[in-house]
Amino acid sequence: MPHIQLLSPRLANQIAAGEVVERPASVVKELVENALDAGAGRVDVEIEQGGTKLIRVRDDGFGIAETDLPLALSRHATSKILTLDDLEAVASLGFRGEALASISSVSRLTLTSRTEQQEAAARVEVEGRDMDARISPAAHPVGTTVEVRDLFFNTPARRKFLRTEKTEFNHVEECVRRQALSRFDTGFTLRHNQRVVQSLRPAESDLDKERRIGSLCGQQFIDNAVVIDAEATGLRLWGWVALPTFSRSQADLQYFFVNGRVIRDKLVAHAVRQAYRDVLYNNRHPAFVLYLEVDPATVDVNVHPTKHEVRFRDGRLVHDFIFRTLHRALADVRPDDHLRGAAAQSFGREPVVEVSGGVPEGGGGVQTPWPETAASNGYPVSQGAQPQQEWRASDQMAFYQSLNEGGGVSSGQASASVSQVSVTPPMEEGDEPPLGYAVAQLHGIYILAQNRAGMIVVDMHAAHERITYERMKRALAEQDIKSQPLLVPLSMAVSQKEAALTETHGDELQQLGLQIERIGPETLAIRQIPALLRGADTEQLVRDILADLIEHGQSDRVEAVTHELLGTMACHGSVRANRQLTIPEMNSLLRDMEATERSGQCNHGRPTWTLMTMSELDKLFLRGR
């Protein structure tokens, strides 16, 4: 039987390096975080051959004293924490004191630094073979430069797991992108094989921050983003979330920072996914750059070697805060918010998208008149409107009921009504509503409208579906969920952990309309279910709820399934294709869209309307060439 013995320092550092140094991007991450902790206002990253030949990180921070240089390369040596209290409220990006020691054990590392108090800089060199530090004088401004050469030269097995030069550099570039998004007050430069890839100046103003995000995440993201900033119970969430119409096929544009540290957290991901639940198309992913600021004492960052995961002291509070903030922000988006990005591209202006509804500034152009009864809504009044075109707000529900019952008007009547409408401009430029005014109906499916930006095409079924859906949700929210007792209780087998959850979360399950009784160590009896879900798969619903409680400490499955049912009911109860509408009826639908939450998408995540700008129309006909 082998005897227990201490590992050599070199072997211990290489084992630690296996957790910290996975690839060149891991080295860049640790070195850039050290530079930011040192108060750097500028960080330059230079890479050769994807990082396997050279990684050089230079900063203008406060530097390292000459006497501390050998200790800086030792394990568990750091200036960032001293006591257990410091560890329980970590405010810096690095704190373990393992990065430099781990990196130096698998590379040839040179560290040159100078503090403001020193007249000259000093350099320390170390190789992974013997790890003996050699100190010598050097020329260097205030700050630090770390050079890492021949990564994994003494661990060839690790080197074999590296990918191609392009792939490794892509990971490095992504790492620098995350750090640049986390610190707007710091300038960044990234070079690869002597070629400048990124050059970012410090961003102080909001406009500079948006420009940096535009250069790192794409200008289209900023053009289609909503700015949010919310505070509650010691938490602050701010940043940019993309409109649901700017969804992605993969989760490659999702950045979440906690106190400046980029993280990947299941709790956060679930809260964001829940906020976007009924506005994203199948298997699409939202895009966002969000920053959560919390008291460092309420979040534990010491739960993973790479520090990509955190643990919140009150995870449920954080989850609800993130969900409600994003849910409210997406609900407050109105058509004019969608239009601003397209309008900015059309007129060559910077878009300013905020979480607010209402009528956008600007107007003009030729518009279809709106009946006099709409004056109370703040929209222009046409002096030439015909009496038979009046469309009162009180008539809307009757109108929708007539559509559901097969009402509407014939194509001949619709043509006659269109011919009676005179096309006149609004009285004032600022009176134009976001979706403009209807001018015609196409094949009984689409509504054609015009506004200052160009032409808008509305899918009238999808739009009415969202309007009906939101009204049904609002009506359901005003009353408690009604339960329906089962004539014969449903028995189901579960694990002991799941059975125990039904006892500890009994009140929450009761609020969801579920009465579940534990009748054995691994057996449950379902006695009541929500009345609306009497046709659903009850056993699968309960299993999903218990899985959510285990994973997130809460569940919204009943709400999700209920809303899915309401969505189906709204779909079947909405206006169908080939239903001819009059101009006032079309305009009423447009006004309802502007007042309805999430009206940019139907219940299934498909868009309800689209805009073709004047510049796009001009290109089709080669105007201006």
Image (spheres, rainbow, N blue to C red):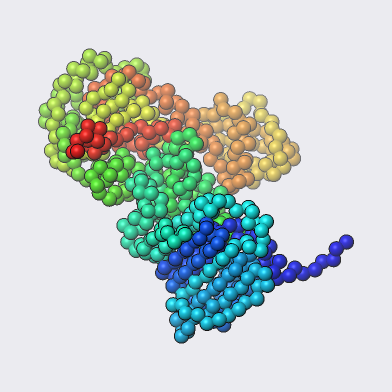
Label total for image: 0
- Residue in the foreground of this view, choosing between 540 and 451: 451
Task: Check the image and report above or below for 402 versus 547.
Answer: above
Quadrant for residue 72, please give it. Answer: bottom right
126 or 375: nearer the viewer = 126
For this view, does 134 lie left or right of residue 247? right
Relative to 614, does residue 288 appear above or below in the rendering?
below
Q: Relative to residue 182, is residue 517 drawn left or right? A: right
Above or below, 443 against 255 in this view is above
| Residue 347: x %, y % from top left | 23, 44
**In the rendered image of this protein, does residue 182 appear above or below residue 524?**
below
Q: Position of residue 84 (x, y in %)?
A: 61, 71
Residue at position x 80%, y 68% from top? 5
Quarter of the image where one finds residue 339:
top left
- What's the residue at 69%, 35% (across, down)? 524
Answer with left or right where residue 594 lies relative to residue 495. Answer: left
Residue nearer the viewer, 587 or 40: 40
Q: Quadrant of the N terminus?
A: bottom right
In the image, what residue occupies the spot 44% across and 72% down? 60
Most extreme residue toward the left, as rendered?
A: 383
Q: Is residue 494 visible?
A: yes
Quarter of the image where the C terminus is located:
top left
Image point (28%, 27%), residue name: 447
Report x, y in % for residue 482.
52, 32
Q: Nearer the viewer, residue 27 or 161?
A: 161
Q: Position of residue 265 (x, y in %)?
A: 55, 51
Would residue 477 be visible to someone looking at this image?
no
